[in-house]
Image (spheres, grey):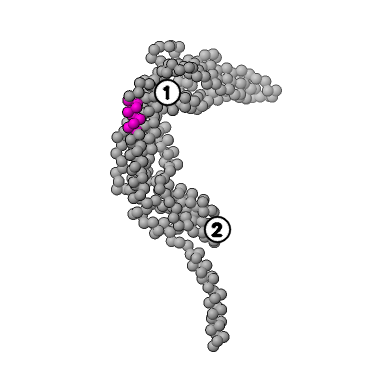
């Protein structure tokens, strides 16, 4: 009898570790059903996985963001708003451009008040799991306060726009207000997901109204673009497109009338160079002078140069022109915006 009891004790002791391990490694229910841990009525939650705890947290955050990306219903509404408020074929704030910017904000949106809850390591799959969540009630207050603060700043910028006498300052203030109004659009959309019963914060200066006002005001800035040399027509076309995209009124005549706010003078030199190779190469040198008649500031010079090559000289020159066009459309566009509009 003693031998039987002793045998049972040995069996129980030898089995005990495996029983503890099995219990310890039992997969938590929240991995498949995060709402079992954080009730949907009070929280938004999502589970992430990865080969490290940090990567699992990142994945959980990403999955939580997808709840917002899937539910934000701004595309049709905002597209209609911007189509209604866009004036003319070319402005700096076209419906297409603004929708692209807002879509980018949505796809890379930063959520507020997100916390990491439980974590679990699965030794069988060698994978970490974590759950990310946000408290609806807490987060609603955070979003409401930020929208209200943005709204106050928008009112301040709009007031400065109205009182300023400088065209460039007025445009800057309006642009600052628009940036904050864009943020409010996204925050309000997120707020409706966090708290579906909430109607969002009423905006005193709606985004579409500010966009329409900026488009109208931008046209009061008059620019004359003047090219010189063999590529005069190309330069004037490229520069007209840039300033049309800013929403300005653009002229391509050698005039110096009182109503001109910016005078843009440009030249382009394309010359063949010998690199002792079978291909033909050219060097291009672009020069653009910006004369600010609004502020009567000292003229600003923008220059760029590079080389292009091809099997024949004509194609090398054509390549140079295409590169110059891209340079003006992107690099010069940013140069002007940074210098005068930010």
Give the residue pinned by disc 2. Answer: 126
First along the sequence among labels 1 and 2: 2
Mark 2 residue crowding within 10 angstroms, few (<14) / some (14–19) / many (20+):
few
Image point 47% across, 53% down: which residue?
A: 48
Quadrant of image for the N terminus: bottom right
Q: Nearer the viewer, residue 113 or 208?
A: 113
Q: Is residue 325 magenta?
A: no
Image point 51% across, 51% down: which residue?
A: 54
Q: Is residue 258 left or right of residue 273?
A: left
Residue 42 falls in image quadrant: bottom left
Q: Name the spot of residue 243 as percent of width and height, x first.
A: 44, 22
Labelled disc at residue 244? 1
- Spatial CA distance of label 1 from label 2 is 57 Å
Prevalent SS, magenta region: helix
Q: Which structural element holds mark 1?
A: helix
Q: Name the spot of residue 135 as percent of width and height, x first.
A: 37, 51
Q: Which structural element holds mark 2?
A: loop
Between tags 1 and 2, which lies in front? 2
Task: Decide if residue 49 is in sight here.
Answer: yes
Q: Is residue 291 left or right of residue 151?
A: right
Q: Nearer the viewer, residue 84 or 212?
A: 212
Residue 10 falls in image quadrant: bottom right
- Magenta segment range? 154-162
**210 in relation to 201, above or below:** above
Image point 36% across, 44% down: which residue?
A: 143
């Amino acid at each position: 009898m003693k031998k039987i009891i002793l045998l049972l004790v040995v069996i129980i002791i030898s089995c005990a570790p495996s029983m503890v391990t099995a219990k310890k490694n039992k997969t938590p229910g929240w991995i498949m059903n995060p709402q079992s841990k954080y009730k949907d009525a009070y929280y938004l939650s999502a589970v992430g996985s990865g080969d490290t705890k940090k990567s699992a947290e990142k994945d959980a955050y990403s999955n939580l963001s997808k709840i917002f990306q899937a539910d934000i219903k701004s595309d049709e509404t905002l597209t209609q708003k911007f189509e209604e408020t866009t004036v003319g074929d070319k402005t700096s704030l076209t419906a297409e451009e603004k929708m692209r910017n807002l879509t980018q904000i949505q796809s890379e949106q930063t959520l507020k008040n997100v916390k990491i809850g439980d974590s679990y390591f699965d030794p069988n799959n060698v994978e970490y799991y974590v759950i990310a969540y946000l408290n609806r009630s807490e987060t609603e207050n955070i979003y409401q306060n930020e929208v209200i603060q943005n709204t106050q700043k928008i009112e301040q910028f709009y007031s400065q726009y109205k009182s300023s006498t400088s065209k460039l300052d007025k445009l800057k203030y309006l642009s600052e207000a628009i940036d904050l109004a864009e943020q409010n659009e996204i925050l309000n959309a997120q707020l409706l997901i966090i708290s579906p019963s909430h109607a969002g914060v009423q905006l005193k200066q709606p985004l579409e109204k500010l966009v329409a006002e900026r488009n109208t005001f931008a046209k009061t800035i008059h620019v004359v673009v003047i090219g010189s040399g063999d590529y005069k027509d190309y330069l004037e076309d490229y520069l007209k497109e840039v300033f049309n995209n800013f929403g300005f009124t653009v002229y391509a005549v050698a005039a110096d009338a009182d109503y001109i706010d910016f005078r843009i003078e440009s030249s382009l030199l394309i010359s063949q160079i010998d690199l002792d190779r079978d291909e033909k190469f050219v060097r291009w040198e672009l020069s653009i002078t910006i004369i600010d008649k609004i502020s009567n500031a000292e003229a600003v010079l923008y220059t760029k140069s590079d080389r292009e090559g091809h099997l024949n000289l004509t194609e090398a020159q054509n390549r140079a022109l295409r590169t110059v066009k891209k340079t003006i459309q992107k690099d010069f566009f940013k140069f002007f915006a940074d210098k005068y509009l930010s």
